[in-house]
Image (cartoon, rainbow, N blue to C red):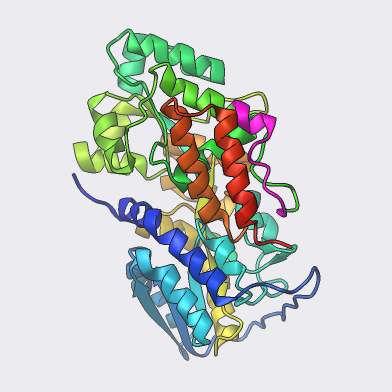
Amino acid sequence: MTITRHRVKRAVFLGAVPAVVATLLLSGCGRTDSVGAATATPVDDSPATGTIEFWAGAPDGDSLPAFLAPFEAANPDVKVNVTVAPSNGFDTKLTTAISSGTVPDMVFLYSQTQSSMLATDAFAPVPTGLVDPASFFKTSYDGTLVDGTAYAVPWYSYANVWYYRKDLVEAAGVPLPKTWADMETFAASMQKTGVANPIGLSVAWDGYSAQSLSEFAKANGGSFISDDNKEWTINSKENVEALDYWAGLIKKGYASADGPQFLDTTPWFSSGQTVLLNNGPWFPGWLDDANGAGWSATHVGSIVAPAGVDGSVGSIGGGSLAVLKDGKNQAAAWKLVQWMSQPDVQAKWYDTFGNLPAVQSAWDSSTAISTDPLLTAVKASIPTAVSVPQVPTWSEVGTVIGTQMERVARGEATAQEALDEAQSQAASIGTGVK
């Protein structure tokens, strides 16, 4: 099986995030400004000059030097130095640089740890007029806000959706699920055709499991955190009901508590052991890598998340571009961010690396995106997708929730008991927001 760029990226974060959060807390870094305190100086229209030090994680960063050549050609007096770091060490490298005061001009932030990074108070507010906030998917743009001020610009966006084995489901004549109740009917029907575990859930029992549960919680009218991000609300009635339903899919035998783990999703799905699972828009590419080009076009379909009482909810992902306030060439860095935010540039980045645009209009202008039927559900899911709580301690709390979810799935605790324990631990950790 081929290990693709996206597969590597997702895998490395499983171990990297807690270390980053711990470093942030121990270093004493943290945002202290209040609402309205940030200022943002507009950027003029003159060409960029000087050297821009740009840090990015691999493998995305490996493609940037060639991709940025047109920007350098249009700004002949500027040089962009791209420093690429392994994804599993990128956030630690950046945290260390922030602590020491030796920072680059701009960086690429991953959505998984963006809130932790922005909480360090190391980043400059986005200049007034640099970009049109309304041009981005709102859920992605909102993730860049701290106290109502944007400290980053969305670079790419996606939402997880549910992929299904189109060939097997259509052959069985089983209707696709539109609601939670439909999920169980669908799974029971597919089991009768010989599918062992029709539904694949996020069973790594870590922060990604917690992120998956957050989708179900939101669809049930719940949330892990209060609207002002100051208090955890993990053991709310709606969240307990969501976990009860989610774990019930495992207890009823429709899903397994042991897989597919992240790297097993492709073989489980390819073999038909699982015929419906939640994943990101890179998943069809993995399947083509494993089974041959064009396999996904004939074997795979995609749907938005089956709806709970509060609607259909996926999870938002992606990344953003941010400028360090102690960088030496902020003006040129912002001009590069502005260039990378153009619809045609973002569409070209999809052609180059496969990351979907954060600018909405680029989805329509790109033929590759607009004609891909598997992306229809992705685009439809983004507006209502939920992000992980945008607080510095989410990574640590997410791991706590994931651990407690396993206890329920394996019959060691009720959903109420598990989320009561998660709430207790999370309350001790705090949200990091005052």
Kindly identify the residue that appears in the image at 34 percent across and 29 percent down.
Answer: 300
Magenta residue check for 232: yes
Q: From which residue to which does the magenta span run?
A: 229-241
Image quadrant where one finds the N terminus: top left
Classified by dominant secondary structure, the portion drawn in magenta counts as loop
Viewer-proximal residue, 104 or 94? 94
Viewer-proximal residue, 103 or 391? 391
Q: Is residue 291 left or right of residue 357?
A: left
**Residue 164 can be seen in this image:** no
In the figure, residue 255 lies in which quadrant?
top left
Residue 109 in picture, x, y percent from top left: 50, 65
Is residue 263 placed above or below 270 in the rendered structure?
below
Magenta residue check for 46: no
Residue 409 in picture, x, y percent from top left: 44, 28
Is residue 194 placed above or below 84 in the rendered structure?
above
Residue 340 in picture, x, y percent from top left: 51, 68
Kindly identify the residue that appears in the image at 29 percent across and 16 percent down.
Answer: 195
Kindly identify the residue that appears in the image at 36 percent across and 15 percent down.
Answer: 170
Residue 268 in picture, x, y percent from top left: 27, 30
